Each structure stands twice: as C-alpha cells, then as structure tokens.
Amino acid sequence: MDYTSCMSELPITQINSRPGVIDLGMGNPDFDLLPLDLLHQSSEKYFAAADRRPLQYGTEAGDGYFRHSLADFLGSRYGNRVDPDRLFVTAGASSALDLLCTLYTRPGDTIFVEEPTYFLALRIFEDHGLDAIPIAMDGEGLRIDDLEGKLAAYNPKFLYTISVFQNPSGITLSAGRRKDLVQLTRRENFLVIADEAYQFLPYSQHKPPSFAECTGQVEQIISVNSFSKILAPGLRLGWMQAHDSVIERLAGCGLLESGGGMNPYTSSLVRGLIDDGGLDENINKLRGEYTRRLEALDGALRMYLPRAEYVKPQGGFFFWVRIPGVDAMELRGKAAGFKVDFRQGALFSSQKGMREFLRLGFCFYDPSAIEEGIRRLADCLTG
Ligand SMILES: Cc1ncc(COP(=O)(O)O)c(C=O)c1O
C-alpha cells in the first residue's frame, strides 16, 4: 500500500490555518525545507549497521555515540572543545523546559521571564503553577538594572532568557550584558535557563555568542537547544549543555529512570547525519533561504506598511513589529476577513501588555507569499 494514500481524517501536523490564509504568525519551518533526503541517507546507514542498541531503553543522559558527534559539531561551531559528558539529550527545547520546571520548581514558585518572551514557554510555566515576573528588555536584551531591582524583591527559582535572536523580538543579548549576567548569577546564586534555539541561524557573518560555552565553569547556567529549527521539529530532539552537577541531577530523575534516555533511535539517525556533514549542509541551506525570506519581509513592510516600526532581525525566525495606535488583538480579528494572520504582541507578555506589537515570521512562506501576506495586512489596516 502506498504510505501517503492512506488518508487520515485526523490531523497530522499542528498547523491549522484555514485554506487560503497566509499565516505570518507561524514559527514553523516550511514543509519544502524539511530534510527528507538527508534523513533517508542516514536511515539507510543506520539500518546497514544493524545495531539494535538504539532500540533498547537508552542511557539516561542520551546515546553516547550521539553525544560525541554532537560535541564535535558544537566544538567546531564554538571553536572550543565541547565535553560530551556535559551534554544531555532531550526531546526538544520544550521538553527540556518542562523537565527543568519539574526538577527545580514547585507550584507557586516565582520565576523571571523576559518581557516579551516565547509565548509557549509561558504555557509550560503555567502548567507548573509558576508565577512569571517580567524583566524589561531594550535593544541590548534583558535589562540588568531591572533584573537587579527584581532580585532584591523576589527570590526566583530561575531566569528564563532567549539570549540569541529572541522569539519574538529578534534581539541578542549584548556582550556587556552577558558578562554582567554571568557575574550576577554567581554573586546572587540563581539559575539561568538560556534558550538558544536560534543560535545557529544568523544571517550575517557575525557569529552569535552562546551561554553554552560558559556552562563548564558556571554551575548556575543551563543552555537549552534544539534540532527543531535547524533540522526538523518532528524529530523531537534537542539537548542541554550544563555543568556536571546539573547533568547528574537531570540524569537521576524519575522520568528517565523509568523511560531511559530520550529518543535514542532518533539520536542515531541524526548522529549519522552530523557525521556526514549533513547538519552543516542543512544549516547553510537554511541560512541562504531564510536570508532571502527575511529580505522579502523587510522589503514588503517598507513598501506596504511604512508605519511599521521594527529593528531588522539579524537571525532567527521573526520580525517584532510595532504599529503605533493599533491594537493588534483587534486587528487580528479583522485580519481573518483579509485572509492573513499573525500573532498579537499580548501573547508574548506575561502581563498581557505589548498590545501594539505583532510577531511576523518569515521562514514558513516563500518570498512571493510573504509579500502577498503583507499586502493583505496593509489592506486590513486601511480597510
Ligand atoms: C525560543 C523557543 N524555544 C523553544 C521552542 C520549541 O522548541 P522545540 O521544538 O525544540 O520544543 C521554540 C519554538 O518555536 C522557540 O521559539
């Protein structure tokens, strides 16, 4: 039977836009850019090796071969050796955040988040009954003065920061602030969870810094990362890089003792792909394609929406656009009639603020659809 001819009435993907609508709110990669060929090749290699061990319950911190390959990949990107023992395999960044909440918090605890922040991380924190206190941001990332002020008033279990090409703002924490934050975590002894899911998607030659690189020395910093944006979200694969003491705590949790390490089978497929240079190849391809799409969105905003205020992102997936005097929530209600969609700023605010902001993604659609989407949005604003 042809696999794809077996039609399911039930949904397959999480994408649920109505037909004909250009949903510029989406944070998903384009279907056409998902690396079917690379995974085909690495699967063939895996089955030729006929190794049954990845089909067994896996070791808690994640498949050893995979952690070695991942360490080599990261080491070549950072220009510094990465210790495979300091890597912990996850089922993606969301699963990492959930596990960290399980291990480091209890319902009713306070945590700090950036304002704005990734809206679905807020959902995970809500599921754990956590009280999220916002830390203000500016063009250099989270504001250390605000963080210091709030540290004097609260005792957070952790600070969640998306320190590189932030979702939604696109901002990267500056080198000076990064240094200040490391000093502060050591002095005040609070945990920093740095979500670096967009780190390998810069659209200039500038290599963004990573908190992963200081986790060997600084016990309080945990770097969370994912293959969702650089390979495919359906793999449900990611990693954390952290100090030995953190890795030990993670690997000792009940979830892993019962279920074993996360995704050993998928790890084996991705390992083959990393070893053959497929991950580097894919990242290069994505960076080229996403640069074209970013330019298309920038050009369309200038042409059709000159009122829009934004800083052109240097990496990641999103534009964070302010349209002064416009309530984005109300605009979104109206946008349905113009067959366009986006995400309103209030979703990304733990305080339901940011009402004049829109998050627009540029990775799911090709340049012509992006331009058409912005044209519709402009019609919606004037119509
Ligand atoms: C900042 C950030 N963290 C985590 C995720 C989810 O990552 P994963 O698919 O690895 O769970 C996303 C996805 O959009 C994201 O933008």
Image: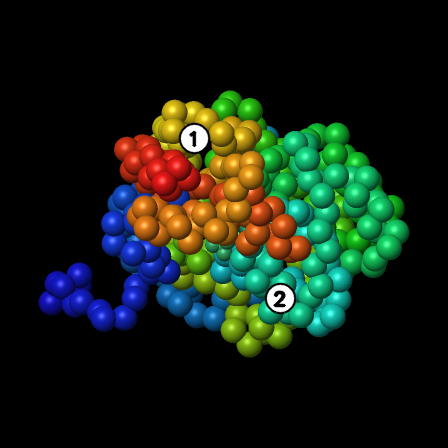
Residue plotted at (62% across, 75% down): 254
Residue plotted at (37% across, 60% down): 14
Q: Nearer the viewer, residue 373 or 49?
A: 373
Residue plotted at (73% across, 47% down): 135
- Residue depth check, mark 1 versus mark 2: number of the one nearer the observer: 1
Image position, residue 274 (x, y; %): 42, 43
Residue 98, quarter of picture: bottom right
Residue plotted at (29% across, 56% down): 18
Find disc 2 in the rendering and name its residue.
126
**Label 1 close to label 2 by CB (< 8 Å):** no
Residue 132, quarter of picture: bottom right
Find disc 1 in the rendering and name its residue.
305
Image position, residue 111 (x, y; %): 73, 58
Image position, residue 26 (x, y; %): 41, 48
Q: Secondary structure at mark 1?
A: loop
Q: Nearer the viewer, residue 254 or 199?
A: 199
Q: Would residue 258 be visible to someone looking at this image? A: yes
Q: Is residue 50 left or right of residue 225?
A: left
Q: Quadrant of the N terminus?
A: bottom left
As shown in the figure, which amino acid type bears the numbered disc 1? Leu
**Which of marks 2 and 1 precedes in the sequence?**
2
Q: Counting other residues with Cα less than 10 Å from the Cα at mark 1, is it few (<14), some (14-19), or many (20 or more)?
A: some
